[in-house]
Amino acid sequence: MCGRARCTVRADDIPRACGINDGPIRSVQMDSYRPSYNVSPTAYMPVVRREDGTGGDGAVLHCMKWGLIPSFTKKTEKPDHFKMFNARSESIREKASFRRLVPNNRCLVAVEGFYEWKKDGSKKQPYYIHFKDERPLVFAALYDSWNNSEGEVLYTFTIVTTCSSSSLQWLHDRMPVILGNEGSTDAWLNGSLSKLDSVLKPYEDPDLVWYPVTPAMGKTSLNGPECIKEIQLKSKEKNSISKFFTKKTENQQESARINLLENVKDEPGNQEDTEDATDSKGNNGSKSDVSSLLQEEAGKCGIKRDYEESAADLKSTIDKLETSHAKKKANLKSAGDKQPTLLSYFGKS
């Protein structure tokens, strides 16, 4: 699809952009041309067509209205330029509005770039698409003429589209037929019908680039360099979903720390477990188990933690627990020495 474009090309540069370099070119109605950064259907744009429309030599620079009005349209009917501002390349030889134009009414449209919108739910973000070296893009197009009830002759055109290139499928499923070299422009303008299929295809070369622009350019009233000024889209990291997962990760870290300390506190409850037992390799069992527990808990939570910092905090906690336990043992031993024995009881009696 192509419904908006930038056409600020100088009139004198349009024939050369379309590959017409032989001598002067005749101009028709070029006083209607108004260069614009935001062109839409119903606007006048310059096109290059063959001199007599029947395959004769020479070319004409003709300013026409964007949005095809077929010649068989009733004179009293109000023209709708938005109905056929694009023509699908796959059906131009089948539909009555286009098939009679293919043999002799082919033309070229030169623009600096075009706009396409990326849909994201209810939001639409426009992108400006152009050549990296800023040379004009040349589109394949068809034109027709229509006589209205007042006897005026109106020339109109439609831009031919094809399926989107592999690099632009993320943006839209259609794109204009871009004629990237003089060979393709000549084939479309002057070539035989048998050669048309070779040019009616997506433009796949990497020199076609794009960037996001202001959504305000969706209004045709905005018409200036600000239409093609690149903007910075908001980072996805700032959205609420990212904040949710960040907060969840912090909660997991705190929960893991609390569970780890509670597990360590529970171990000294059994007097036998508080002894400095060693394994068969001479390693301190309780400290080794705590280190393993720290690593296991961190693995279960799926969180990358600073092991050394956690181990330091844990060692401080263990030292306090061991000190407290030693005091309890000392108190028990001291109290046991002062208790009367059975022998002393009978001795007194």
Image (cartoon, rainbow, N blue to C red):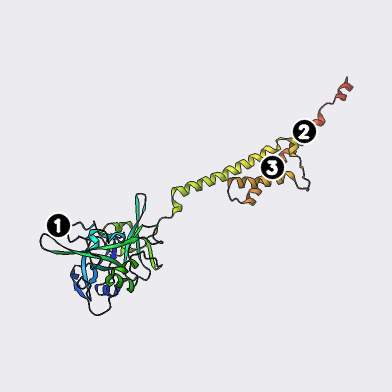
**Furthest residue to the right?**
347
Question: What is the crowding at mark 3: few (fewer than 14 residues within 10 Å), some, or many (at least 20)?
Answer: few
Where is residue 191 drawn, in percent x and y? 29, 72
Question: What is the crowding at mark 2: few (fewer than 14 residues within 10 Å), some, or many (at least 20)?
Answer: few
Could you tell whether 256 is left or right of 27 in the image? right
Where is residue 16 drawn, in percent x and y? 28, 75
Q: Amino acid at mark 3?
A: Lys
Q: Amino acid at mark 1?
A: Lys
Compared with residue 340, is residue 274 higher up or lower down, i.e. above or below? Answer: below
Name the residue located 70 percent from the left edge and 35 percent from the top edge. 269
Asked if the residues shown at circle 1 and circle 2 are in contact, with their CB atoms under 8 angstroms apart, the answer is no
Q: Nearer the viewer, residue 72 or 300?
A: 72
**Residue identifier under label 2:** 332
Q: Secondary structure at mark 3?
A: helix
Q: Give the quarter of the image for residue 301.
A: top right
Where is residue 91 drawn, in percent x and y? 29, 59
**Residue identifier under label 1:** 74
Total count of labels: 3
Q: Earlier in the sequence, mark 3 or mark 1?
A: 1
Could you tell whether 288 is left or right of 236 in the image? right
Asked if the residues shown at circle 3 and circle 1 are in contact, with their CB atoms under 8 angstroms apart, the answer is no
Question: What is the crowding at mark 1: few (fewer than 14 residues within 10 Å), some, or many (at least 20)?
Answer: few
Could you tell whether 192 is left or right of 155 in the image? right
Say if residue 86 shows up in the picture.
Answer: yes
Instruction: Name the quarter where the N terminus is drawn.
Output: bottom left
Numbered circle sitting on residue 319: none
Q: Amino acid at mark 2?
A: Leu
Q: Earlier in the sequence, mark 1 or mark 2?
A: 1
Numbered circle sitting on residue 320: 3
